[in-house]
């Protein structure tokens, strides 16, 4: 009973209880879909006669990447699939995760496409694109990651 001197407490616990109740379901259905469809951040810099592309891609291995040069386009892509299976006497659960992305960049005319080098270390894919003095169209080439 409120005699008018005490403030009325609102029922603010309902949203919290509601959120807590549905949290496991949201986690199940939202299982990182944002991570699956996220495109890695890329920095492009120019210095010392080179262009440098640095792509943040932690959790991948160099074997997961594919780098392709076709004319004046360079495409960097990756795919990774993991599976996890848990067995207990009462249940079996199998989960899998598939991650992929693809980024394509237009190469400047003064890049020597046949001299592009790539290195993957500490979660970063680094490409060095040497510049040339006279511009010509780069040939199609697959880049090996060391």
Image: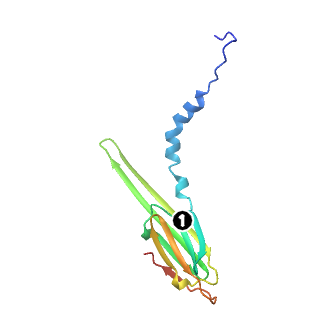
Corner quadrant of residue 19: top right
Corner quadrant of residue 17: top right
Which residue corresponds to the image point at 52% horizontal and 34% vertical from the top-left? 21
Give left or right: position of 23 versus 133: left
Which residue is outermost to the front?
48
Q: Position of residue 123 (x, y in %)?
A: 46, 64
Which residue corresponds to the image point at 68% horizontal and 12% vertical from the top-left? 5
Colour scheme:
rainbow
Quadrant occupied by the C terminus: bottom left
Q: Foreground: 13 or 127?
A: 127
Q: Position of residue 95 (x, y in %)?
A: 42, 52
Which residue corresponds to the image point at 62% horizontal and 84% vertical from the top-left? 110
Q: Foreground: 79 or 114?
A: 114
Which residue corresponds to the image point at 52% horizontal and 47% vertical from the top-left? 29
Q: Is residue 119 above or below residue 86?
A: below
Q: Is residue 93 above or below residue 113?
A: above
Q: Position of residue 84 (x, y in %)?
A: 38, 54
Neighbour tally class for label 1: few under 14, some 14-19, many 20 plus, Cα within 10 Å: some
Which residue is outermost to the right?
4
Q: Position of residue 133 (x, y in %)?
A: 62, 88
Q: Is residue 72 above or below residue 95?
A: below
The number of numbered badges drawn on the structure is: 1
Quadrant occupied by the N terminus: top right
Residue on which the image places disc 1: 101
| Element class at badge 1 | strand
Give left or right: position of 2 versus 74: right
Corner quadrant of residue 108: bottom right
């Amino acid at each position: 009973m409120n005699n008018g001197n005490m403030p009325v407490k609102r029922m603010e616990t309902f949203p919290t209880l509601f959120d807590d109740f549905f949290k496991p379901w949201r986690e199940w259905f939202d299982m990182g879909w944002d991570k699956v469809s996220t495109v890695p951040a890329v920095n492009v810099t120019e210095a010392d006669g080179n262009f440098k592309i640095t792509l943040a891609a932690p959790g991948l291995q160099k074997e997961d990447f594919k780098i392709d040069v076709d004319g004046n386009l360079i495409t960097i892509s990756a795919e990774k699939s993991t599976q996890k299976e848990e067995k207990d006497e009462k249940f079996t659960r199998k989960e899998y995760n598939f991650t992929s992305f693809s980024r394509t960049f237009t190469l400047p005319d003064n890049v020597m496409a046949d001299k592009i080098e790539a290195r993957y270390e500490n979660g970063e894919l680094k490409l060095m694109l040497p510049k040339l003095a006279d511009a010509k169209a780069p040939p199609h080439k697959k880049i090996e990651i060391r």
